[in-house]
Amino acid sequence: MREYKKVDSHILESLVEIVGAENVLIDDHELIPYTRDHQWLRYPDMFTFKPEVVVLPESADQIVKIVHFANQERTPIIPCGARTGMTGNCVPVYGGIQVDMKKMNKIIEIDTDNMVAVVQGGISLYKLDRELKKHGFICGHMPGSQPTATVGGAISTNGWSEHRMKYGDIQDQITSLKVVLPTGELVKVGGGVSGKVEKSSVGFGALKHLFIGTWGTLGIVTEATLRIFPAPEHVYSAAIAFDSIDQACKAALKMFMKDVPMSYLLVGDRNTVQFSRNVSPAYPDVECVMTIIIEGNREIVKISKKLALKICEEFGGKDLGPELGRAVWEEAYDAWGTWVTAYGPGYPLDEEGAIPYHRAPEVVKHFEEILKKYDIDLIGIVVGLAPQYPILGCFWRVDERNEKKWEDYKRVSEEIAEIYLKEGGTISMAHGLGTRREEKFLPMELGSSYELMKKVKVMLDPNNIMNPGRFGLDNAYKV
Amino acid sequence: MKSSIELELFRDALYTCSAASCGFCREDCPIFTGVRKESTCARGISAIMLAFLDGFIKPNERLAKTFNLCTTCRWCTERCPINIEYPTKPPNLRIDIPEMIENFRADLLERGFVPAKVKEMLLNIRRTYNPWGSPSGKRMAWSKGFTVETLSDKTSLEAFFICCAYSYDERAKEVVDVAGTLFEEIGIPFVTLGNNQWCCGDMTLRLGEKGLSELLAEHNAQMFEKHKIRSLISLSPHCYNTLKNDEIYPESNVNNMHYTQVLAEKVDEGKLKPSKRIEKRVTFHDPCYLGRYNNVYEQPRKILESILGLKLVEMYRNKKHSFCCGGGSGRVLTEELPYHERPSNERVKEAVEVGADVIATACPLCLIMLNDATKSLELEGKIIVKDVLELMSEAL
């Protein structure tokens, strides 16, 4: 393991000089909230991952100085946004300086003519969306953490959007980035001269992707220019019951083939339905439920809705009525609160990956068999949100204070990961791989690109100070 | 040294919040919005509390200062998805950070950790029965030029409870004088307890000083009984909430109301008919202790909408989504944040954005905080802050 310099009084004084005393945090109670993100790390083990100091820079210039200094002192830097990642990748492994981006939360420009917004990395998707709505636009990136996640965090995690079938994910929306490299240079990548051009073939035209989904290991995103979308005139949502996941998946595939312009489609299995009924007894007792959202131009939504319902009916689908349909849309971000409480205090968890659509019914059965072997508090299994290789997610809840359940969870997690790989899919479409599974599964999925990943890391971060300890990348450095 | 047994009651809720760690409480938390540190939002606070329960954080002055930033506005409680209720939900899984923070403040206070300004305010209340530390004998000084009937030796069925802010803050004093005239004009005698009224105990409770709160409540309750008061109209939502809901006031047959509820009834009955026009764009700032704590949203709006010429415009964050002014929990007197981090500045900017000429409110603490913010933003003359009472009085 690489040796890093501990944060001492000299480092603290220098940080105070760069960002001001009010933006340097060293008290225990200030550091404790930085020992976790949304991921499940056993309490109180997570306190071993405390940063030594937290800084809140207010400008790219300050970040440049911090990074130069960290290189000089060989002290790790770990950038973070809202800390709603699911894999602990913004939690320091070796202590060091946590760079909290949340003070860099300005909207620099909303360009409605060119349909882009220029923002600082620490702005929340919620605040951005709220401001855009005043101009008749929306932010197209809508993860489950939208009420709080930051743009920079979404970029670093290559975040997943629930309405991705219409708007894409953040990776599709970025036109350009400004990034502070691990060696301290501030670079602009992508977007042509203005930074607003969606695509360019000049030079390494897609170089911006080097910083999307690299979890803050290759740089700190200070500014992003991203596409924005006209606010939909009309939103139609529906809950449709099917007799089996097989029928639901067939209906979904046909809707994709007929180009029904959905923004959201998710099929919940029998367990998901039963869970919903436990929470809300009025929820219908059916085998599985598909929820869809179609949004946009009023006339197009009207026609698309008719087509969608007609196709679903061909496969035995029954519309469960406007109330349930509306609940899909209006309660989208908050329903997960019931997962956290339904079985008593504990962590809500989901493992997700992607498998081919036609394999979904069988894989769901296979998952159910695995889950039954162990004492898992299951919430449900869902499939959807992509026209090919849909996400397949298992949601459950673990009380980590129960030793047996904790061990069971770890085994289930690995067995499920092996199935995703066997199906030719990915172990994670949304959340990423965290510290629990990366050592075993990362090389298995990435194959030869894993060595490429290491080369890129060493090239950009010769001192391994930018969020070290991730993805086994420390092994890329000769000690 | 672990914390007290009472705090253990919150363990399951704190563990659940920490386990979920969603952070939905963060955006629109009035303190986090300006300060931006993890320790200032409910998610961070609950992580700190859990660590404190298990001795991973030692009690200290700086911890007390961080805990004292919370305004107890209850936005986090409102927003928290864990607080969704359903029939089979296990008990004790409600995330109520204001309730928890009062208890943690009490714990730190007992150990001697309290920020200097808070200590000074609590001492003021102990000595003079009001947070301003002004002489208790001057509680009625605002009534110069207006005769109020005090209850020093009489009995009355209905009386007004006058927040200390109205007695001792120069801006708020302008409101209570107007209130007296208005209520008398519509046939409600403006009867008060005079200098015999003590602070209701809202601030002391929020800051964890339960003993002092009980002392204040005991005295006030004795006054209510002595004068056979059966109906109390509070001008401040904080007094209204404490008298109506806090346990220091035992259940009694006193009916507690906020003045907006009384005036709205009069509008409905046709007994309050403002005749003068006020040609202004007015936005109503929902006080947290009137709205989120007591679900009173429509009555102030009804009163304002009865004024001819007045155009009511809504801010984006309104009603149960109202953005706190930052004055609760005693912060109207203990605020130390720089102006650009203050919630009140943020709120005034929001009002300007909707083109309001006037920010109306129905709380003296909101009035003081927002008024102060208009000055720091150099917006005097461009936007003014008024109590609903003042606007109604101008329109009569």
Image (spheres, coloured by chain):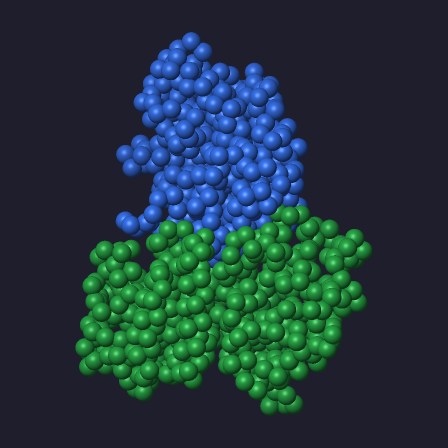
Chain seen in green: A
**In which quadrant of the rendered image does the C terminus of chain B lie?**
top left
Residue A119, how many percent across, how many down?
A: 59, 68
Q: Is residue B12 above or below residue A97?
A: above
Residue under the image location 42 percent in, 9 percent down: B153
Residue A423 shown left or right of residue A25 in the figure: left
Residue A109, how many percent across, how many down?
A: 59, 69
Residue under the image location 31 percent in, 70 percent down: A368
Residue B267 shown left or right of residue B355 in the figure: left
Residue A116, how many percent across, how many down?
A: 54, 74
In-front residue for pair B349/B6: B6
Q: Is residue B237 above or below residue B97?
A: above
In-front residue for pair B112/A241: B112
Residue under the image location 47 percent in, 39 percent down: B8
Residue A186 shown left or right of residue A323 in the figure: right
Residue A169 shown left or right of residue A215 in the figure: left
Residue under the image location 51 percent in, 16 percent down: B195
How many callouts does the rendering have? 0
Q: Quadrant of residue A354?
A: bottom left
Q: Is residue A260 something that shows in the picture?
A: no
**In which quadrant of the rendered image does the N terminus of chain B lie?**
top right
In-front residue for pair B237/A468: A468
Residue A173, how many percent across, how many down?
A: 51, 77
Q: Colour of chain B?
A: blue
Q: Is residue A3 above or below residue B248?
A: below
Q: Is residue A351 something that shows in the picture?
A: yes
Residue furthest out toward the top: B153
In-front residue for pair A232/A171: A171
Q: Quadrant of residue A298?
A: bottom left
